[in-house]
Image (cartoon, rainbow, N blue to C red):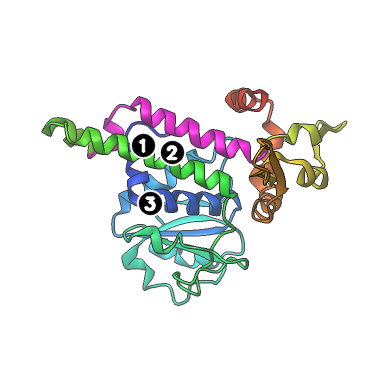
Amino acid sequence: PLPHGASITSVCRLLGANGINFLLAAMLTECKILLHSDDIGNLCLVAEVMTALMYPFQWALPYIPVLPVPMMEFIEAPLSYLLGVPSTSVKLISEIPEDVVMIDLDNDFSSAGGIVDELGRNSSANPNTKVPTPLPASTASNISKAVYRLLQHNDNNDQGRNGSFASARSFPRMARETQVEREFRIAVALEVAGLVRGFQDHLVIGPSNQPMFNVEKFLQTAPILFDEQRGTSLTSTSGLRVLSPRSRRFVSILVTCQHFHQFLEVSESESLSFFRQVMNE
C-alpha cells in the first residue's frame, strides 16, 4: 500500500528533487542500495515511501530498512538489495563495495545528484560509490517539477499552521493525506508507468500462461526512448523525434530487472488497474 499523509512530503523535503530522482533510478535499475542516517526513523520512512513510488513495479529483493549490526556482512552480498544502517554503524564497514549506491540521508543531497557523465561517474560523489544510470531526462524533469509543486504548496501552508497542527505533522502517519500529496503520488506513478508505455504491443502469453516479451522490438519503438526537438524552420510547428541515448541506456537495464518480469506476470491483475487506465489514455 502507498504511504499515508505527510510521509511523502517529509521524504521530498529530506531528499529534494535530485534525491528522489537519484534513488528512484537506483531502485528501478535494481542497484545495491545502502542508506544511512543518524535518525533510524528516516531510514524506515525513506525506504517505505520510495518503494511505494515505484508503482507499478514492486521491490522484490532483500529489503531491510534497519540492518542489525550482526548482519553487517550482508552488505557484501552478491545480489541487489535495499538496506539501511545508522550512520554510527558505517565505520564498522571495513570497505564499501564499489557496486553499492551509498546515500547519506542527513546531508544535502545535491552533491549526490550532480551531473553524471557517460560512464555513470559523478565528480562530486565518493569515487568508491556507484552512481545509478539516470532516469530519462523528461521523466526526471517532470518528477522534479512535481516535487517542487508539493514542497511549495506545503511551504505556503506552513505559514498559516497553528501549534497543534504542526505537532501532528511531526508524525507523518498521524497526518491526513492532502490533495496535493495525492496529486504528487499520481504524477510520479504516471512518469514511472510511462517508462514502459507500449510494452503490451510486444507481450505474448505462452501456452503455459507465461509472458514472453520481445525486448529487442520494445527497445526500438518504446515512446520513452525518443525526445522531441523543435523544428528548425520558423514556419514549422511540428517536432522531430530523435532517439535519446540516455533513455535507451536506462530502459535497457529496466527491462532486464526482476521486478519488470514480475510486472509482466501480473500486468492484468486488479492491483494494476490504474496502470492500465494510464496506458489506455
Identify the element where label 1 is drawn.
Answer: helix
Say few, some or many: other residues with alpha carbon within 10 Å of mark 1 (under 14 / 14 to 19 / 20 or more): many
Q: What residue did someone put label 1 on?
A: 150
Q: Position of residue 175 (x, y in %)?
A: 27, 30
Identify the element where label 3 is drawn.
Answer: helix
Q: Which residues are magenta?
A: 170-196
* Residue at point 50%, 41% (across, down): 142
Label 1 vs 3, first from the N-terminus? 3
Identify the image quadrant of residue 169: top left
Eye-nearest disc, 1 or 3: 1
Q: Is residue 77 visible?
A: yes
Q: Position of residue 244 (x, y in %)?
A: 68, 52
Say few, some or many: other residues with alpha carbon within 10 Å of mark 2 (under 14 / 14 to 19 / 20 or more): many
* Residue at point 54%, 68% (across, down): 76
Q: CA distance from mark 1 to mark 3?
A: 13 Å
Eye-nearest disc, 2 or 3: 2
* Residue at point 21%, 36% (across, down): 158
Say few, some or many: other residues with alpha carbon within 10 Å of mark 3 (under 14 / 14 to 19 / 20 or more): many
Q: Which of the two residues, 266 or 176, is positioned nearer the viewer here? A: 176
Q: Is residue 140 left or right of residue 17?
A: right
Q: What residue did someone put label 3 on?
A: 15
The kind of residue on which mark 2 rests is: Ala
Q: Is residue 193 left or right of residue 109?
A: right
Q: Are marks 2 and 1 in contact (CB under 8 Å)?
A: yes
Q: What residue did someone put label 2 on?
A: 146
